[in-house]
Amino acid sequence: MTGRSFDQSGRILHDGGKENMKAITVKEILQETGGRLLQGSTDRSMKGACIDSRQVQPENGFFAMKGEKTDGHAYLGDVLKKGCRILVISDEEKAPDESVLRGAGLKKEDVSIILVPDTLKALQQLAKYYIAQLPLKKKIAVTGSVGKTSTRDMLYYVASTRYKTGRNEKNYNNEFGLPLTILSFDEDLEVAVLEMGMDSFGEIDTLADIVRPDIAVITTIGISHIENLGSREGIRKAKMEVTGYFTPDSVLVVNQSCDLLQKDMVSGNYRVVTAGNDGKSDFVVSNVCDFGDKGIKYTLDRNHKQYEVALPVPGAHNAMNATLALAAGEILGIDLETAIAGLQNAELTAKRLNIRGKNGIKVIDDTYNAAPESMRSAINTLVATRGIRKVAILSDMKELGPESEKYHREVGAYAGSHRIDFLITVGEQARFIGEGAAPFLGADCVKHYGSRDDLMKEIRQMIRPGDVVLVKGSRAMEMENVVKKIFEEQE
């Protein structure tokens, strides 16, 4: 999660490490969270925060979170044994007593314990304080219904051509992950690229309050989480919370190809920069060529000048994601030639159109999440990837509200009409994908399984050498287990 910098040829100049993180003292924690010191010194300091006792490092401060299934207070003895010496808790009765301290070979004065009303709120307050202390030239927020992680990753590589840059890793984009990311940043970081996720109103506002971004990127407004937000207009309203702390010097970058991200719909007391494929945007995308697993190529028009952009990542939709990253890079002062060269280093986060092969079988692992838009994009990549047979294994798309059946049927019709060879569906809602595809493919080319485990029992019979296999579904479906099983069957 720390910063990494490259020279223009892509060689790593610096790879951040925890030794470069800024120490935060107990005194600062008390000051920023309004906590009360139960014991220990105010001079003791931490580098980085942790909420998982299994991952805690000696230099970390441990924040004991209370969740639906577990309570971090139950693991305070474990983190003390691992060397952690700063504990932030919300339940005074569960503070480690002398017997717990003795079990870790410690005395009372060896550990600083801070009591706060809410450990999550304290973590967020500390992250807000920490990021404000860093000498950042720019803070960039990235959000959107689809493509935000890929755009974040691409923007990281663009910014890294000139600046020491940090980003969230994996899926650390929520109320827990974003502050943990910030508290891992090196003290000499120059640019922060921070993805912001949400599924309800107010969540991005919380994250934007912590970060106070100078630049924000909105990739698209789809129908993910429409069950919670009521409509696509509601989703846009929630995404636009990212601008809530903007100043007149701030910049919003949007994908104007999205019908709900037209410039006049997102304007405010800040500058708006647009990307699109309609010829009217500030950055215009055209001539997109999808080479499947070989990547994509497209033409970018900017200020009456054309640039050829070739990307080593699959998926035609990534042309727009890359262009949003390039637009934000220009705001950072990075010329387009340099930024385009930086994209050649781009590696997208795992489980997003990650293509791997073994024993003649090629698997497109896109199991991180799913919505109708990303399903269609992944199907396009499957069709464009060279192979004897094109097989799609698609599972439920969650949180699509009362029209979920319709959206699943539409994805099925899209898959069927795009000439895939065999469709496997998994889950209660995914059967409608199969029903949507059957008129195009024929019933013999569609197979449904009620659960992931049922499919995994028969996966050996379903897949054969020469196949290109797309595996995709919502995060809750855990379809990465299917990918793992496919490769295990090839051993």
Image (cartoon, grey):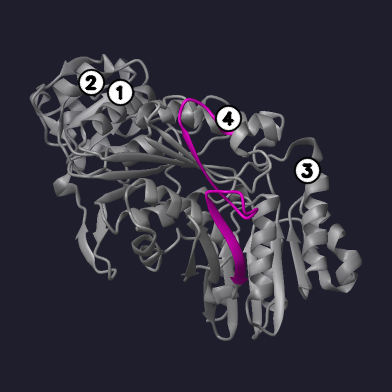
User: Label 1's element?
Assistant: strand
Cα separation, mark 2 vs mark 4, equals 34 Å
Q: Which mark is residue 114?
A: 2
The answer to whether 449 appears left or right of 326 in the picture is right
Name the residue type under label 3: Ser
Q: Badge 3 is on which residue? A: 404
Q: Residues within 10 Å of mark 1 (few under 14, many from 20)?
A: many
The residue lying toward the viewer, choosing from 38 and 285, is 285
Residue farthest front in this picture: 304
Residue under numbered circle 4:
238
Q: CA distance from mark 3 to mark 4?
A: 21 Å
- For label 4, the crowd category at 10 Å Cα-Cα, with few meaning under 14, some 14 to 19 and many 20 or more, is many
Tag 1 residue: 89
Tell which tag, 1 or 4, sits nearer the viewer. Answer: 4
- Is residue 1 shown to the viewer in this render? no
Give how far across and how far down residue 179 sits, in percent. 35, 35
Q: Earlier in the sequence, mark 3 or mark 4?
A: 4
Who comes first in sequence, dot 3 or dot 2?
Answer: 2
The answer to which of marks 1 and 4 sits earlier in the sequence is 1
Residue 21 seen by the camera: yes
Range covered by the magenta-colored residues:
266-289
Q: Earlier in the sequence, mark 3 or mark 1?
A: 1
Q: At x 83% / y 73%, what residue is drawn? A: 445
N-terminal label among 1 and 2? 1
Amino acid under disc 2: Ile
Marks 3/4 in contact by CB < 8 Å: the verdict is no
Residue 204 in percent (x, y) is at 49, 30
Q: Nearer the viewer, mark 2 or mark 4?
A: 4
Disc 3: CA contacts within 10 A as few (<14), some (14-19) or many (>=20):
some
The kind of secondary structure element at disc 2 is strand
